[in-house]
Image (tube, coloured by chain):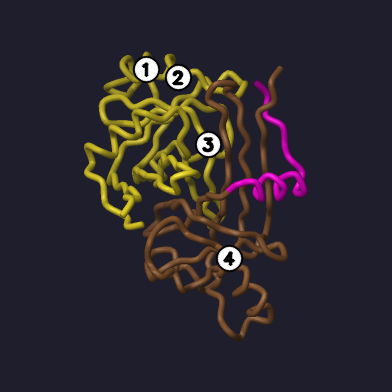
Chain colours: A brown, B yellow
Amino acid sequence: MPLTSLTAEECWQLVSTAEVGRLAVVVSGYPEMYPVNFTVVSGCVLVRTDPGVKLRHGHFRRVCFGVDASDVVARTGWSVLVRGVVHELSDHDPRAAEFAAAAARIHPWAGGEKAHCLVITPVAVTGRRLVPG
Amino acid sequence: MPLTSLTAEECWQLVSTAEVGRLAVVVSGYPEMYPVNFTVVSGCVLVRTDPGVKLRHGHFRRVCFGVDASDVVARTGWSVLVRGVVHELSDHDPRAAEFAAAAARIHPWAGGEKAHCLVITPVAVTGRRLVPG
């Protein structure tokens, strides 16, 4: 089954259909990835988190945000990768109010206060889809 | 909903239930992740691939293999991360015959010959599960 590339517009449309994505970071030379709830606002991906591995990347380190879906019966699927830099939202951010309001609407499945908001600013967005035939 | 840690045994049992995982690699400083079909043999994760980003990591670079599942209705899920090193299977591998036979039983959804087999040798396995209540 051939893989076809998705346009940026198609990528964002697919991302908007998902409730869970994955944030990939680099820790001690190893890539790691963590499922996260998220939202997209003004072209940025927002994730709420508690202090930990993810938050320690919140000073403009390179990360990747991925969303994919697969249909085990049809053996098809799609995958979108958002490469970008992540920073922790602060009051100094020119979009602080807009981002904080959007982050408040994320309802993380996992417990914890998750009072910190990570903002992933995309550098590149790519996607692929398995197309039958 | 609290997160609980999984034992290595629980991690591998959950991994065995999945048909699709994600291979995370580091490219130009950015983590990236790609959905892959896989199998587990003798404690190693095998992935078939064609020449490309993933195969270029096949000389004992650090990677992460992840599998997760989420239940959007119950808002629960689990996630397993296998940190390890990856190499391309060759005839010189002491387990070449066993691994090649196992790799032949992987039926990748995506097209392409996928004649190359990547062997991920785990360095650490961790997992978490969201537990209701």
Residues rendered magenta in the picture: A1-18
* Camera-nearest residue between B8 and B56: B8
Relative to A96, say whether B122 is above or below.
Answer: above
The circle on residue B35 is 3
Q: Is residue B35 left or right of residue B17?
A: right
Ranked by sequence position, the earlier of labels 1 and 3 is 3
Say yes or no: labels 4 and 3 on the same chain: no
* Camera-nearest residue between B23 and A102: A102
Ranked by sequence position, the earlier of labels 2 and 3 is 3
Q: Which chain carries label 3?
A: B
The circle on residue B106 is 2
Q: Return the residue at label 1.
A: B102
Q: Return the residue at label 4.
A: A105
Looking at the rendered structure, the secondary structure element under dot 2 is: loop
Q: Where is residue B118 in the image (x, y as percent from the top left)?
A: 43, 30
Q: Which chain carries label 4?
A: A
Dot 2 amino acid type: Ile
Dot 1 amino acid type: Ala
Q: For the residue carrying disc 1, how many other residues have a C-alpha within 10 Å: few (<14), some (14-19), or many (20+)?
A: some
Residue contact at pointers 2 and 1, CB within 8 angstroms = yes
Q: Which residue is drawn at 47% across and 59% down?
A: A108
